[in-house]
Image: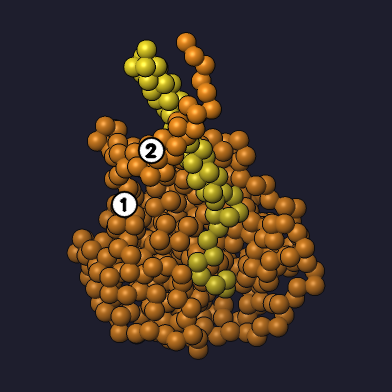
Amino acid sequence: MRRVSPYHHLAAVLIACLVVFVIRPQQRIDLHQILPQGAAAYLIDYTPYYPGQKELYRHEIFAPYNRQKKKIVIMGSSVADSIGCDSSWTSANPHRKPERNVHIACSVTGHLNALLEQQGLKDWQAFNLACDSSRLASTLLTYARIAELRPDIVIFIDSFPYAETQNAGVSYLDPNLYAYMDGVFSKTPAVAAIWQPYSRFLSRRGNVTNYKVPETDAHTDPQQATGIVDHINLNDILVAALGHMRNVLLMDTQPLPVLLEPQRRIWIERGDRDLEETNPLPDYLQGFDVIRTQQATHHGQFLLVFAPMFDQRHNAPYLASLRGGRYDGYLRARNINMLDLVSLSLKPVYETYDGFHQTAYGNAKVAAAIFNHLEQQHLLPGVTDVSN
Amino acid sequence: MLNRLKINDLLKVAGLSLAYIVVFILLSAAIQASQEKTGEAKINFEYRVF
């Protein structure tokens, strides 16, 4: 037998290039039919961070391994999504790499998961679906997309009254998205009765100038985007397997040491706020009632948390309207479960770096307060107070 | 003799091609997998920060 010559190799490389890069059977042959149903869900690279509306299906709440978990969903704006371990999250520190010190363990969600584990509630998990600058309208869209997962507890954390500023972010929604939410919230008469007049109210508010529309394709059909791909090829399987191996080997980057910046004194510059002046009408708040009522359809809970606001903690008009004004009256009338953390004791710089965003340490306090509230409301089975 | 030689060559090229195809497919999948974002890069600054 003759040995293999360079010409054999050359011919083989040319043929292989033709097959792999031109004919591409590894990408063209659909293996969907021969794989078990739902196999595609195992090929997705899931993330604990909010991945954006376009890639929401990549969030770990959709992962097959979390299907049986009892779910606590954290929603809201940056006060809820402060995954940064320190101020570099909102103002990047160019002197270190990576510039932003962020890790899911530093968030309220991360600390809540640590408490759940500590209390032996291994079948419970908190998921972070909050998003920077998110308003009530865009949060409703996210909620509509996860409603079918029937979360046990939905927690909306608001840096009061941010949720409804800029018309609750209605410029984010377009007719397609209204139609999508209609499909979700009109299934049950009780929810439809609140949602339908509310959606008409929102859509009448029109577009708002000065509102930065997120880099999301708002015209993407969310149902389609949420749907797992139904075409699987060999390349998908290999990429998923190699990506998983890589994640296991490298793991996520560890957070940097927390950087505390005593020179940051932003909270002193802000004046007192008056809720009765800044709050337009409780009309916007019906969004909370939509979530509460939708949750009730599967015996789920809804909790509205007013986030700590260091600069307003002694503001009497603010606190009075929060605890007895129109805002509070509306929520109480609809039996919406509330937790007021505005005056939560936080150390400036160390626990809150700007007066309303918390460091990893402040987020731990917020998580403990939420955990204790859930425990006092008997929403978590057999747990003890974690105040100390 | 000529026919036998051609068959042998074809078999060698076919075998080598198969090996190269496997290597190229794995290589392209590895490159694609390495481009997937992990860790901090997964954070989505979809909106402006508050």
Residue type indicated by callout 2: Val
The quadrant of the picture occupied by the C terminus of chain B is: bottom right
How many marks overall? 2
Rendered orange, the chain in question is: A
Residue at figure coordinates x 42%, y 57% from the top left: A55
Toward the bottom, the furthest residue is: A277
Label 2: which secondary element: helix
Which residue matches tag 1?
A227
Residue A37 vs A319, above or below: the answer is: above
Q: Nearer the viewer, residue A210 or A337?
A: A210
Q: Nearer the viewer, residue A50 or A71?
A: A50
**Cβ atoms at labels 1 and 2 below 8 Å apart:** no
Percent position (x, y) of residue A350?
Answer: 74, 62
Residue type indicated by callout 1: Gly
Q: Are marks 1 and 2 on the same chain?
A: yes
Q: Nearer the viewer, residue A281 or B38?
A: B38
Given this view, does label 1 or label 2 mark the residue nearer the observer? 2
Toward the top, the furthest residue is: A1
Residue at figure coordinates x 45%, y 51% from the top left: A59
Which residue matches tag 2?
A19
Rendered yellow, the chain in question is: B
Q: Image quadrant of residue A359? A: bottom right
Label 1: which secondary element: loop
